[in-house]
Image (spheres, helix red, strand yellow):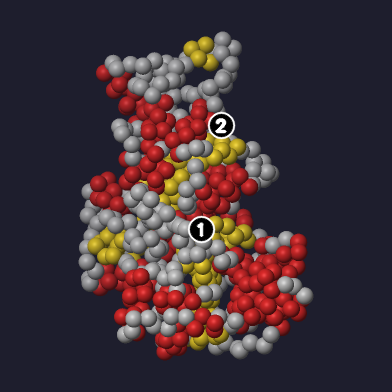
Amino acid sequence: MEEFTWRVGGPQGGGIETAATLFARAVAKGGWWVATKREYHSNIMGRHSYLDVRLGRKPVGAFRDKVDFLVALDGETLARHLDEVRPGGVLLYDPKVLDLTVHKLPMLDHRVQEALAERFGKADPSLKEILAAYAEAGVQPLPYPYEEVADRIGAELGVPSLQARRTLNTIAVAASLHLLGFPLKPLLEALALQFRGKVLELNEKVAEAVYREEVPRLSFQLHLNGYEPGRVYLTGAQAAALGKLAGGLRFQTYYPISPATDESVYLEAHTAFPGADVAVVQTEDEIAAVTMAVGAALAGAKAATATSGPGFSLMAEGMGFAGMIEAPLVVTLYQRGGPSTGLPTRTEQGDLLFAIRGGHGEYPRLVLASGDILDAFLDAQKALAWAWRYQTVVVHLLDKFLASMAQSLPKEALKVLSLNGEKRLAPREGFGPYERYAPAEDGISPFIPLGTPGGVYWMTSDEHDLEGHITEDPVLREYQMEKRMQKLLTARREIPLEDQYTLYRDGDVLVLGFGTVKGTLLEALDHLPGVGYLHLRLLWPFPEIGPLLEGKRLVTVEHNYSGQLADLVQQETLKKVHHRVVKYNGRPITLDEAVEALKAVLSGEAPARLVLRKGV
């Protein structure tokens, strides 16, 4: 096999994330490149969640419509994921759920119940009938009584049933890998990364016991792919956190909000990393988070805050304050479905225009979007450096998909970048009052942190003169506005083109995207001769890409309703975007969807606005 996708589904809080992490780490130890996608409900316990682990012989960053192997830890997984296992694939399920009917699945949405009722022609179809539909579609159902296996192994080991059943996630992973003919050793190495002490010892014994059992040989097997040491396995949120540490972060604030919280919690747990010297503060709300970060920056610390849509809305005034006083600030924005609280744990790219324009009045801000996990690590460093170089707000855009996605990466790719260019005045004797907002050709006035011995200047959120005193003088107003906004021209001139955009391939049909469509579209190119892809990283100030678009049939692919990138491209380049491929149901665009949509563009069958609708 060149690629393979394993899915585990079950109730939120039922250990499925642990199962997916174990599976991913085990196959990665066996030399496969892996990427993991997590879909989960915003409640804490009970509702259906699932994770996909896709592996390939070369790095992977996209996901497929159908999976090769589905592990159903409950009956609802059988019902929800019908038609999502490829013909010839495998369904591993607990036979005890076959006594249930659709109406006995308490968390199953009414819409799904109604769709199943219509499909099977009866009000309350049974899971036996649903299982038969899997088989009719060419899927191989394999009964596996997880709890019975746990009880049996527990009895062999002299472990109480309740304790043995806590290893169900390990049992599911071990059974899957054993069926696939994958060796035990990589799984044991993965368990050692996941657990400690007596818990590790029990899970190791359970895995070994599962491997001693006889299992049928599947028509496809998962063998070792060699092994190259030096790979790391990170989520997007973890990568952004590590990137901030690598970039010299000293102060991070946050108010808990999905999916941004993961980054700050990871920082809290790793402040003891070698070289790390960072304080992480959980504030009472997002207004406090942004203003506290501004205060830390004024004191000379590289500071950031992390949030998601509703929190970002509350931060608008604090960001405007930073823009007015020219304080360096990074706001890491994890986009999720909106408006309001919307879809707290589902992905979207609906905040692009708000990130660029959010807040009243105008001030220079930079907006940088990460396309994958390595980008998240490197861009976090760049965001901090740019905030200090240009003394302004940098919005670092990620999204829920990237936040919870995990990927194996070569460790050497996680480079600490050499970035500088700050304009700080060194303390000197007799400093006294100084012109904080002094004229500067590049728009960037020299800066001293608050508390610099002898240094005196004024600071106000009102318009001000060169020393910071409040003014409403029209000439000074014009000067200050023009000085501040000059920073955007300076940034666009100074920031390397490879940090602004990358033309991965040219073509008569040119696709434009930003953020996490990157992995999907790069892999889609293998199936689309004649199609090019232009990936945008710096969204504001908008790169000068007009010449690249001349004579092309332009297509944007993005996770929002209206096609915000298309609007931005047309606004800034005056080039018409001919097709907007959009998805806004909270689920990421799959490789198959992207290929199908772009083939429709090539054939002339695609409408001007093409909506992608797949996902559970």
Name the mark nearer the viewer: 2 or 1: 1
- According to the image, label 2 marks what residue? 301
Image coordinates for residue 373, horizontal then vertical, percent = 51, 56
- The quarter of the picture where residue 136 lies is bottom left
Q: What's the CA distance linking mark 2 and mark 1?
A: 36 Å
The answer to whether residue 409 is left or right of residue 575 is right
Q: Residues within 10 Å of mark 2 (few under 14, many from 20)?
A: many
- According to the image, label 1 marks what residue? 44
Q: Amino acid at mark 2?
A: Ala
- The quarter of the picture where residue 86 lies is bottom left
- Residue 186 in sight: no
The answer to whether residue 85 is left or right of residue 554 is right
Image coordinates for residue 117, horizontal then vertical, percent = 34, 80
Q: Give the label on residue 255, or none.
A: none
Q: Quadrant of the C terminus?
A: bottom left
Image coordinates for residue 319, horizontal then vertical, percent = 40, 34
Identify which residue is drawn at 55% across, 28% down.
300
Q: Residue furthest right?
A: 158
- The quarter of the picture where residue 29 lies is bottom right
Identify which residue is drawn at 50% across, 64% down.
46
Judging depth in this view, the residue of 382 and 561 nearest the camera is 561
